């Protein structure tokens, strides 16, 4: 699980990140609006944690920004603002949760894991890209009129790519999702990517699965 935390109190952020890491939650961190937008440009998250009062503005503006750039990512506000007006504002901007300071780290961890579950449950069961049509519920994939046969592991990777679409998925996230608690060779990883790529796109078809060196793997018509 990967989350973004936007918090200007560096000491609080450090304690929170250490605790969440021990809970199996990876964290990207920003302490202002500008950094948060920049860090999130090439990444997708299972949840985003926002403070309201930040050095260069309010977390509310970040919520509006992420509603456009990360529409499927759950937002949780973590703030000292106790007023009902602030809570109503946060929820009106699409936040799914609101936790006030001081807080218990264990409670934050549980809330984040619940948000990830909500994200998974709300992922669309159908996906269209160019002439690729995928029904995740029935595990049916078609390229124009060509049925696509995938192994269970290839289906798992395809679903992960669809969940993160249109953003790339980092190699680390793929390894942690498909091979949790296992040491995986580079050849195994590359073979899985190659087989899914060849199944999705035959030689006479436009490639839809791309690898961006140093960034990750993504679905896209053109790269």
Image (cartoon, rainbow, N blue to C red):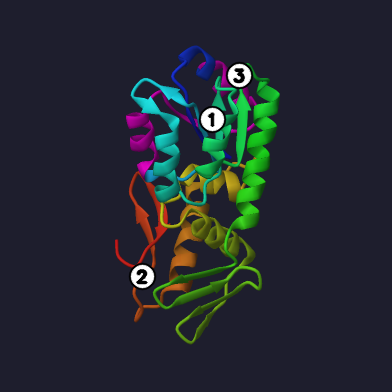
Question: In the depicted view, which residue is nearer to us: 145 or 55?
Answer: 55
Instruction: Give the residue number, with chain letter if any, for mark 3.
Output: 101
**Local SS, label 2:** loop
Badges 2 and 1: C-beta atoms under 8 Å apart? no
Distance of mark 3 from mark 1, alpha carbons? 14 Å
Q: Which residue does the image show at 41% across and 57% down from the upper left?
A: 166
Q: Residue at x 33, y 24 (%)?
A: 56
Label 3: how many Cα within 10 Å (few below 14, some 14–19, many 20+) = few
CA gap, disc 3 and disc 2: 48 Å
Neighbour tally class for label 2: few under 14, some 14-19, many 20 plus, Cα within 10 Å:
some
Does residue 34 show up magenta in the picture? yes
The mark closer to the camera, 3 or 1, is 1
Can you give x and y, in whole percent of width and height, for residue 117 in the image?
66, 47
C-alpha separation, residue under disc 2 versus residue under disc 1: 47 Å
**Which stretch is magenta?**
14-41
Predominant secondary structure in magenta?
Answer: helix
* Residue 175 placement (x, y as % from top left): 55, 46
Quadrant in which residue 217 is drawn: bottom left
Query: Which mark is first along the chain, 1 or 2?
Result: 1
User: Foreground: 175 or 28?
Assistant: 28
Where in the figure is residue 165, as x and y percent of width and height?
A: 45, 57
């Amino acid at each position: 699980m990967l989350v973004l935390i936007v918090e200007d109190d560096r000491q609080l952020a450090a304690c929170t990140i250490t605790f969440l890491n021990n809970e199996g939650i990876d964290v990207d961190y920003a302490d202002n609006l500008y950094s948060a937008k920049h860090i999130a440009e090439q990444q997708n998250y299972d949840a985003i944690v926002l403070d309201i009062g930040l050095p260069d503005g309010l977390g509310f503006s970040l919520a509006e920004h992420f509603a456009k750039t990360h529409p499927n990512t759950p937002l949780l506000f973590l703030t000292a603002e106790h007023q009902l007006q602030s809570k109503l504002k946060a929820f009106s901007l699409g936040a799914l949760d609101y936790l006030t300071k001081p807080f218990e780290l264990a409670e934050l961890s549980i809330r984040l894991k619940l948000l990830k579950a909500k994200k998974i449950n709300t992922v669309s069961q159908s996906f269209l890209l160019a002439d690729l049509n995928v029904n995740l519920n029935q595990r049916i994939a078609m390229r124009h009129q060509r049925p696509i046969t995938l192994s269970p592991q290839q289906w798992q990777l395809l679903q992960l790519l669809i969940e993160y679409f249109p953003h790339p998925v980092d190699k680390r996230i793929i390894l942690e999702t498909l091979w949790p608690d296992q040491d995986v060779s580079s050849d195994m990883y590359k073979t899985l990517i190659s087989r899914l790529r060849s199944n999705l796109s035959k030689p006479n078809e436009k490639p839809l699965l791309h690898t961006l060196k140093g960034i990750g793997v993504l679905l896209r018509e053109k790269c």
